[in-house]
Amino acid sequence: MSQEKLSLLSGVDRSHISDIENCKIDYPGSGTIEKLAKALNVRIDQMFVWGFSDPTAPYEDN
């Protein structure tokens, strides 16, 4: 998915997404992570490399 499309789906500015991808932001805020997870239809823990959950499970909005 392009940064532009992710930006449109999540409401997170494209330049902010670029900065996260390029490690210019060490710790994105929890709100940003939640918006990106929802747009990508994944659980928040799946946004982290060290998550131990089933990557095939769909996102559930609590």
Image: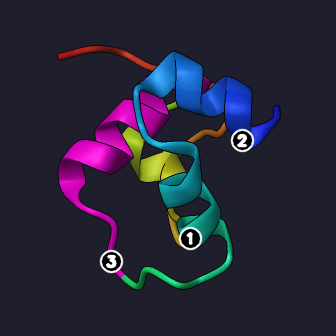
Amino acid type, label 1 = Asp
Is residue 50 positioned above or below 34 on the image? below
Is residue 8 positioned above or below 23 on the image? above
Q: Which SS does the magenta portion mostly show?
A: helix
Q: Residue furthest right?
A: 1
Amino acid type, label 3 = Tyr
**Secondary structure under badge 2?**
helix
- Residue located 53% across and 84% down the image: 24
**Secondary structure under badge 1?**
helix
**Foreground residue, 52 or 6?**
6
**Residue that numbered label 3 is attached to:** 27
**Foreground residue, 61 or 33?**
33
Nearer mark to the viewer, of 1 and 3? 1
Say few, some or many: other residues with alpha carbon within 10 Å of mark 2 (under 14 / 14 to 19 / 20 or more). some
Q: Quadrant of residue 40?
A: top right
The answer for how far apart the CA atoms under marks 1 and 3 are is 11 Å
**Residue 14 image offset from top left, x and y in percent:** 58, 45
**Secondary structure under badge 3?**
loop
Amino acid type, label 2 = Gln
**Residue that numbered label 1 is attached to:** 19
- Residue located 23% across and 61% down the image: 29
- Residue located 38% across and 43% down the image: 44
**Foreground residue, 23 or 37?**
23
Q: Earlier in the sequence, mark 1 or mark 2?
A: 2
Is residue 43 positioned above or below 32 on the image? above
Q: Which residues are magenta?
A: 27-41
The image's colour scheme reads: rainbow
The answer for how far apart the CA atoms under marks 3 and 2 are is 18 Å
**Foreground residue, 24 or 51?**
24
**Residue 3 image offset from top left, x and y in percent:** 71, 41
**Residue that numbered label 2 is attached to:** 3
Q: Quadrant of the N terminus?
A: top right
